Image: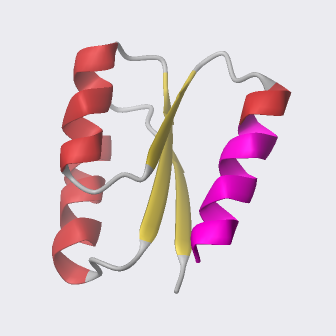
Amino acid sequence: RDLIIADNVHGESGLELARQVSEKHPAMKMIMFSGYSDFYAQSAIRYGVSDYILKPVDPGEFSRTIQKAVEKL
């Protein structure tokens, strides 16, 4: 399995990426970084994003999130 870590800097394009990955590679894990609100995070998770980190990113949170994703692989 693979892991995608995406920094969502263009609004809907990040959700589109999540949708496409979910459709074509449903087993793939995806973590998304964004400065957008909780509503955006809910939409991303609906498209299969396994975790969502709000910016600015806390290094400890980043490390825990990556470790959790790797363990799931």
In the displayed structure image, the side of residue 68 where residue 25 appears, left or right? left
Q: Position of residue 71 (x, y in %)?
A: 67, 69
Q: Position of residue 33 (x, y in %)?
A: 53, 35
How is this picture coloured? Answer: secondary structure
Which of these two is toward me, 35 or 30? 30
Residue 21, compared with residue 16, is above or below; it is below
**At x 27% / y 77%, what residue is drawn?**
26
Residue 11, compared with residue 44, is above or below; it is above
**At x 28% / y 55%, what residue is drawn?**
18
Q: In the rendered image, is residue 20 in sight?
A: yes
Magenta stretch? 62-73
Q: Position of residue 66 (x, y in %)?
A: 70, 53
Q: Position of residue 20 (x, y in %)?
A: 20, 66
In the displayed structure image, the side of residue 43 where residue 37 appears, left or right? right
Q: In the rendered image, is residue 12 in sight?
A: no
The answer to if 69 sits in the magenta stretch is: yes
